[in-house]
């Protein structure tokens, strides 16, 4: 694996790194699918250059930003990041999902998909542990209070 320097691009074997930040050359595999890293995508976060990740696919929505029915601010909030959750929360139509395909430019790199899944798993697990005890504790406390009130009410009526 020799190193070759050519026009501000450094090629080290199969990886291509960008030293100027001007042009990106994503990894490609058979079939011509381009893979982008999170770092590649994060720099595309302004209105004149807007990329989103939705379900592991990378979309360049720059030309759509002014046409978006929800306003450009909605897209700019998610620009350069994974917008899957926001996209699904809104409940986009089938037409919107089909329209999205015309902005497809590639896939999120497999290494970054693993990082995203691990991050989601950590977020989900931490949220579950804090709420799981409340799902049984609150009904238990309510049942105890109802039991005490019921016994008190029954005992009062028996002694009368």
Image (cartoon, helix red, strand yellow):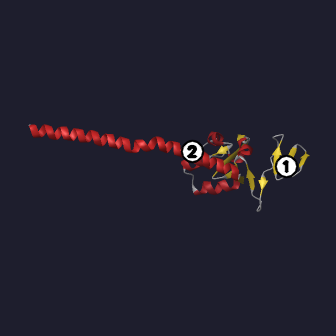
Please state which of residues 38 and 13 is positioned toward the viewer in this rendering.
13
- Kindly identify the residue that appears in the image at 66 percent across and 51 percent down: 113
- Kindly identify the residue that appears in the image at 31 percent across and 41 percent down: 142
Circle 1 SS class: strand
Q: Which residue is mark 2?
A: 122
Circle 2 SS class: helix
Q: Which residue is mark 1?
A: 12
- Judged left or right of residue 125, residue 138 is left
Residue 128's disc number: none
Whole-percent x, y for residue 63 in the image: 72, 47
Per the model, the C-alpha gap separating discs 1 and 2 is: 34 Å
Count residues near mark 1 (Cα–Cα under 10 Å), then give few for <14, some for 14-19, many for 20+.
few
Q: Quadrant of residue 72?
A: top right
Single out the residue that lies furthest toward the front: 1
- Kindly identify the residue that appears in the image at 61 percent across and 41 percent down: 74
Single out the residue that lies furthest toward the left: 160
């Amino acid at each position: 694996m020799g190193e070759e320097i050519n026009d501000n691009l450094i090629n080290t074997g199969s990886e291509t790194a960008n030293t100027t930040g001007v042009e990106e050359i994503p990894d490609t595999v058979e079939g011509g699918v381009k893979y982008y890293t999170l770092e590649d995508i994060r720099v595309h976060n302004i209105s004149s250059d807007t990329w989103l990740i939705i379900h592991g696919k990378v979309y360049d929505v720059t030309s759509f930003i002014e046409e978006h029915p929800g306003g450009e601010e909605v897209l700019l909030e998610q620009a350069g990041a994974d917008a899957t959750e926001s996209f699904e929360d809104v409940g986009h139509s089938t037409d919107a999902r089909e329209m999205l395909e015309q902005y497809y430019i590639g896939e999120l790199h497999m290494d970054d998909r693993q990082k995203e899944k691990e991050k989601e798993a950590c977020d989900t697990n931490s949220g579950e542990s804090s709420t799981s005890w409340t799902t049984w504790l609150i009904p238990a406390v309510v049942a105890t209070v109802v039991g005490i009130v019921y016994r008190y009410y029954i005992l009062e009526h028996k002694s009368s």
